[in-house]
Amino acid sequence: MFSRKRGEAKHVRSADAPPSKALADSLASDGLPPAPEFGPWDARQAPDGVQLLDLGSLRIPAIEGVEVRVQANPDGGVEQVVLVDGESALQLGVFAAPRTEGIWSEVRAEIAGAMAADGVSAREVDGRYGVELLARVNTPDGPADVRFVGVDGPRWMVRALYQGAAAADPSREGVLGDVLSGLVVVRDNEPRPVREPLPMRLPREMAEQGQAAQEAANGNQPG
């Protein structure tokens, strides 16, 4: 047994006991969990040598045949990203999350609740990234299938919404699935409220093209 005098402070030196393997791994990786087998990747763990479209907090792999549709505000901030391949579309969003826990399960429940309030029944299924949410919604063009996929990362969450053929049948994701598994998230060090969208911006080339098109349109207007 060990004893010490009353009031005597106990000092523990770093050499008294080696850190556990889990702690050592955490310190070695700057608090990151082990790298996943496939993305979405945190920028600190992303593979090298991949051509990416840089949208700020989100970098999208450049895959031939995939059309990238970006909606931006007048300041160049990206408000919506949709990728289209044939009869399928993939809408992407990236949000702030806590350091210690994921938020997809909570977000998924809220999405299902909002759908139920609109009379839409959603069901949960197991997918490549865990539990997904499937539903058939009413649109101006008639009923349409949607599939929500969430991926929790270190201080971020990616929400992916498949529409069209890839929503009705996951085996038809094709290259859109490759886009999702190749995404890279760049989480800044700013403290942000949970679920706040991480900032995205147009790549310089796209911003310059948009500005030139706007100037040309303004120049063609009658005086």
Image (cartoon, rainbow, N blue to C red):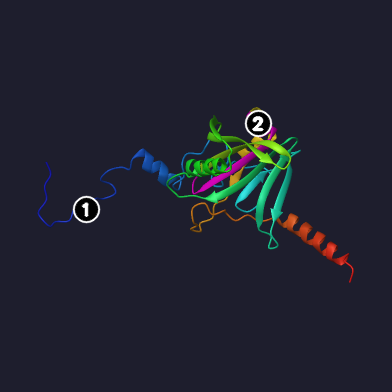
Look at label 2 and name its amino acid.
Ala
Looking at the rendering, in which quadrant would you find the N terminus?
Answer: top left
Q: Which region is colored magenta?
A: 153-170
- Left/right of residue 138 with respect to residue 194 in the rendered view: right
Where residue 57 sits: x, y (%)? 60, 52
Quadrant of res 142: top right
Q: Position of residue 91 (x, y in %)?
A: 65, 44
- The amino acid at mark 1 is His
Instruction: Report helix, strand or loop for mark 1.
Output: loop
Q: Which residue is mark 2?
A: 168
42 and 223: which one is in front? 223
Residue 174 vertical placement versus 115 (above, below): above
**Residue at the outermost left position:** 5
Q: Residues within 10 Å of mark 1 (few under 14, many from 20)?
A: few
Q: Residue at x 59, y 38 (%)?
A: 120
In the picture as drawn, the residue positioned furthest to the bottom comes out as 223
- What number is the disc on residue 145? none
* Residue 98 position in % (x across, y down): 45, 50
C-alpha gap between disc 2 and disc 1: 62 Å
